[in-house]
């Protein structure tokens, strides 16, 4: 009887140890699974952040390109405004010529401007005169807080 009891105790102990071992292994897998899940989540988060950074960088570059394009267009328009009156004068333009900042000038000042342009002999003289005129008009615009317009009377 004692031997049966000893065998039963040994079997029960073996089963208990096997159960504990199995539970420990499952917990280890569960923790590894959680860690793997956490690592996978971290990698996904890093990929998301990298993608967002790349998108923000692309947006920034697009914004910079648009600003540069707009600056170029503005400069082209300003240069065209400077060239057009000179070209019209060279071609014998008359009293209806557009004047940069004409809205900030009196009728007498606009007439004087046209007379001065007609009297200039070379393209270089006209460019210098227009450059000085632009500076004066821009200063007047800042002083009065009025935007500059190109007018033709």
Image: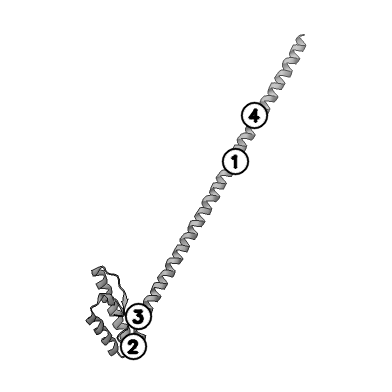
The picture places residue 75, in percent across and down from the top left corner, at: 39, 74
Locate residue 54 relative to residue 110 in the image: left or right: right
Disc 3 secondary structure class: helix
Q: Nearer the viewer, mark 3 or mark 1?
A: 3
Q: Which residue is mark 2?
A: 93
Camera-nearest residue between 137 and 44: 137
Q: Nearer the viewer, mark 2 or mark 1?
A: 2
The picture places residue 116, in percent across and down from the top left corner, at: 26, 86
Disc 2 secondary structure class: loop
Query: Residues at badges 3 and 1 in contact (C-beta under 8 Å)?
Result: no
Q: Earlier in the sequence, mark 4 or mark 3?
A: 4
Q: Which residue is mark 1?
A: 37
The picture places residue 3, in percent across and down from the top left corner, at: 77, 11
Q: Nearer the viewer, mark 2 or mark 3?
A: 2
Q: Nearer the viewer, mark 4 or mark 1?
A: 1
> Spatial distance from mark 4 to mark 1, Cα to Cα?
19 Å
The picture places residue 128, in percent across and down from the top left corner, at: 30, 83
Q: Which residue is mark 4?
A: 24
Residues packed near mark 2 inside 10 Å, few (<14), some (14 to 19) or many (20 plus): some
> Spatial distance from mark 2 to mark 3, Cα to Cα?
14 Å
Q: Earlier in the sequence, mark 4 or mark 2?
A: 4
> Spatial distance from mark 4 to mark 2, Cα to Cα?
98 Å
Q: Earlier in the sequence, mark 3 or mark 1?
A: 1
Q: Which residue is mark 3?
A: 82
Q: Earlier in the sequence, mark 2 or mark 1?
A: 1
């Amino acid at each position: 009887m004692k031997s049966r009891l000893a065998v039963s105790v040994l079997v029960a102990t073996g089963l208990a140890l096997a159960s504990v071992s199995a539970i420990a292994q499952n917990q280890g897998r569960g923790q590894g699974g959680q860690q793997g899940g956490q690592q996978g989540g971290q990698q996904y988060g890093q990929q998301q952040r990298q993608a967002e950074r790349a998108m923000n960088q692309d947006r920034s570059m697009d914004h910079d390109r648009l600003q540069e394009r707009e600056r170029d267009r503005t400069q082209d328009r300003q240069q065209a405004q400077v060239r057009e009156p000179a070209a019209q004068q060279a071609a014998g333009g008359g009293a209806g010529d557009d004047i940069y900042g004409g809205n900030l000038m009196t009728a007498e000042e606009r007439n004087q401007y046209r007379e001065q342009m007609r009297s200039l002999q070379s393209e270089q003289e006209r460019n210098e005169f227009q450059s000085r005129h632009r500076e004066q008009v821009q200063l007047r615009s800042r002083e009065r807080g009025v935007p500059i317009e190109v007018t033709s009377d």
